[in-house]
Image (cartoon, rainbow, N blue to C red):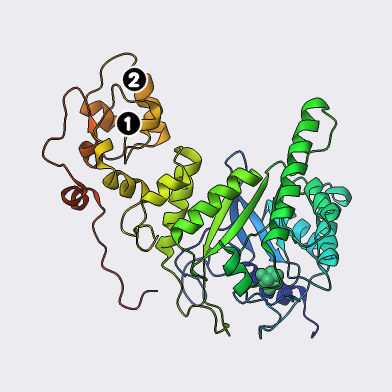
Amino acid sequence: MTQLNTAEKLAILADAAKYDASCSSSGAQRRDSKNSKGIGSTLGGGICHSYTPDGRCISLLKILLTNSCTFDCHYCINRRSSNVRRARFTAREVVDLTIDFYKRNYIEGLFLSSGIINTPDYTMEQIVEVARSLREDHNFRGYIHLKTIPDADPALVAKAGVHADRISINVELPTESGLLRLAPEKSQNRIESAMGSMRNAIEEGADARKRFRSAPVFAPAGQSTQMIVGADAATDRDIVSRASTLYARFALRRVYYSAFSPIPDASAVLPLRRPPLMREHRLYQSDWLIRFYNYTAAEVSAAADPMTGMLPLDIDPKLAWALKFRDMFPVDVNRASKEILLRVPGLGPKAVRSILVSRRHRALRLEDIGRMTVSVRKLRPFIVTTDWRPVSLSDSADLRPLVAPKPIQLEMFGT
Ligand code: SF4
């Protein structure tokens, strides 16, 4: 490996980290201010945004310790056989960069991942050393998110939880067959066993804190994972079902979905095109329905096309479900339970809370609902109020054009 200076390493290792979606926002327009008027850029790497458990948006230094890897996962630009420029930070260099950036007010925390150097245990030791040194040598109180290596010794992974706010272990692909085909050196059993150990450690840590105030905090922002969408044949139904199982078995805070993005020098087993970004968006909406609207995975899956198992791209999964189960509507907003109100397209948890409070005092009219929601026009076919009852619309075929968003003309050369 040729000698690189810190700026060169940062450019390579921040760029290599951008494929990990578990703390970033994707889909921003490509803009920069080089050779032109203006300031700022969406292209520069290294700093991304994330949300803390209390809802604050913070900036993180997002880098890899190294983009060299002994594994050869087909979908990964850092795989052993990839022809990319390699770089490696020492643990000390990452610590110094984090502290420098923090003091300059560029960042509020660190997101650190790594390719596998030598052995999973050695790599994990280096990752833990970064977090340990930040916390113990520099008394760093900022946010730390560590990506852990499932094959590493569980004792090392547990040490990561002592210093990090959040731990993530990627399941990578939604199905075991996809993992076998595209990441043959990884094992679903080993990944799940690491996630199970992390769940136990987090729960034991939280329990100890309840009993002894002096007990150390252990990964207070929990654990998360990421699934790549569109690199294998898994359908949206497979993905929703897998995510729901992961939430239930490992008490995950988040499952992130990352639309597969074609990489330079791609392996022949990968698709040539990326899936539509809207697919990733629909999966996030489905995830939201399960976590905040009490839908089961089976209910969300019922909104998918029965033949292909894919969610519609032109309408959101909640609307797709409502159009499919038209006999559940209209619902009377003055009588329906909270669970039923949450099924109405256009009513979110906040609006439902307002309805439940307001209707204790008086019967609600359509204009009352209008004040609690963004658009009452879309809601009307699905609700009954004291002065409103939909009459003519009876099935999803005549209703869909009225409630679906207007189609947008796509750019001819857009991806
Ligand atoms: S182990 Fe991680 S870094 Fe290495 S090739 Fe697989 S996905 Fe890429």
| Residue corresponding to mark 2 | 358
Determine whether the beta carbon of the residue marked 2 sits less than 8 angstroms from the nearest atom of ligand 1. no
What's the residue type where badge 2 is placed?
Ser
Quadrant position of residue 405: bottom left
Determine whether the beta carbon of the residue marked 1 sits less than 8 angstroms from the nearest atom of ligand 1. no
Tell me whether circle 1 and circle 2 mark residues in contact (CB < 8 Å).
yes
Query: In the rendering, at what x and y percent does residue 410 appear?
Result: 29, 70
Determine the residue positioned at 80% across, 54% down: 157
Determine the residue positioned at 77% across, 43% down: 201
Q: Residue furthest top?
A: 361
Quadrant position of residue 70: bottom right
Query: In the rendering, at what x and y percent does residue 409 appear?
Result: 26, 67
Above or below: residue 83 compared with residue 35: below
Say few, some or many: other residues with alpha carbon within 10 Å of mark 2 (under 14 / 14 to 19 / 20 or more): some
Quadrant position of residue 389: top left
Which quadrant of the figure shows ligand 1? bottom right
* Rendered-image quadrant of the N terminus: bottom right
* Rendered-image quadrant of the C terminus: bottom left
Look at the image and tell me whether residue 376 can be seen: no
Element assignment for label 1: helix
Above or below: residue 39 compared with residue 350: below
Describe residue 33's horizontal placement relative to residue 310 as left or right.
right
**Viewer-closest of 92 and 238:** 238
Q: Residue furthest right?
A: 137
Look at the image and tell me whether residue 302 can be seen: yes
Determine the residue positioned at 40% across, 61% down: 278
Per the rendering, the mark at residue 108 is none
Element assignment for label 2: helix
| Residue corresponding to mark 1 | 372
What's the residue type where badge 1 is placed?
Met
